[in-house]
Image (cartoon, rainbow, N blue to C red):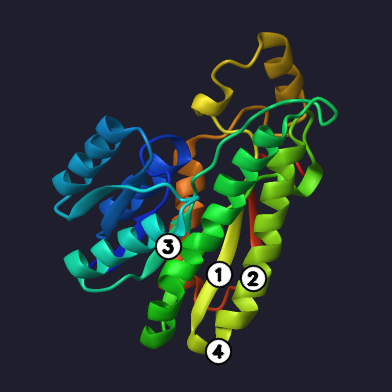
Amino acid sequence: MKFKGRVAIVTGGARGIGRAIALALGAEGANVVVNYLSAGDAAEAVAGAIRGYGQQALPFQADVRNLEEVKAMAGRARETFGRIDILVNNAGIVRDNYVTFMKNEEWDDVLDIDLKGAYHGIKAVGREMMRQKSGRIVNISSDAGLMGDLMRANYASAKAGLIGLTKTVAREFAPSGITVNAVSPGIVETDMIAGMAESRRQKQLDRIPLGRFGRPEEVAQVVLFLASDAAQYITGEVLCVDGGLRM
C-alpha cells in the first residue's frame, strides 16, 4: 500500500486511462478524487471500486476549462481529506480534422481541455503542495505531441504544450520538493480508438515493434511509479508507454 494516507486528484478519472489510474492509486492505498464532466455514473462506479479496496473516494464534477470549478474541486479535496499529495492531469478530448478544414471551436475545445485544463489543475493545487514541501504532478501527454499525428494538429499541439508545461513547472517547483513529470502513451485501447477503421488499425499496429496496442493499466503503472517515493529524484521527464512506436 505505497500510497496509504495520501490523497490524489485524477482529472478525467471516469473512463479509459484516467479510470485505470484512479483504480490503481486506490488499490495502492490512496484516497482519490475522481473528476468527471458528464460521465457521472461511470465516476461513481470507479469511486465504488476504490471504496471496495478500503479507501475513500470522491466523485466530483468539474469542467477543467473553468479555473473556479477546478479550485472548488481542490477545495473539496482539502475539506474531505485534509491535504492533496498527487495530481494527475489526464482529462482530454480529440476533435479530428485536417488543419485546413479545422474549425476554430475544434481547435479551442481541444487546447482548452487538454492543455489549459492541466494549467488550471496545477494552479489549484500548486501553492498547497509548496507549503507542504511535497507533491507529485503527472501530466498525461501523448506520442502525438512528440511525433505529430494526422488530422490532429489541435491534439498534437496541446500534448506538445503539456511537455513544455511539465518541464517549466518542474523547474519552478523543484525547490519545494515537488516533482512534475509527463507520461506519453502511444495507441491505447480506450473509447478514443474504438471506432478506428480496421485498415487504419492494422496500419498502426504495423508501426509498433511490440505488435499490439497498449492497455490503460500499463499506462497507470507508470503513473504510479512517478507518483511514488521510488521516483523522488525524477522530475521534468517524459516517459513513453508506446510499445516502441517512437523508437
Residue at screen point 38% across, 44% down: 13
Question: Would you name the residue on which mark 3 appears?
Answer: 87
The amino acid beneath tag 1 is Val
* Label of residue 175 in the image: 4
Task: Report crowding for label 3: few under 14, some 14 to 19, many 20 or more residues within 10 A (C-alpha).
Answer: many
Task: Report crowding for label 1: few under 14, some 14 to 19, many 20 or more residues within 10 A (C-alpha).
Answer: many
Under tag 1, what secondary structure?
strand
Q: Are marks 2 and 4 in contact (CB under 8 Å)?
A: no
Q: Is residue 192 left or right of residue 26?
A: right
Under tag 4, what secondary structure?
helix
Residue at screen point 15% across, 44% down: 52
Residue at screen point 65% across, 42% down: 108
- Choose mark 2 or mark 3, whichever is in front: 3
Question: Would you name the residue on which mark 2 appears?
Answer: 236
Distance of mark 3 from mark 1, alpha carbons?
9 Å
The amino acid beneath tag 4 is Pro
Distance of mark 1 from mark 4, alpha carbons?
12 Å
Question: Would you name the residue on which mark 1 appears?
Answer: 180
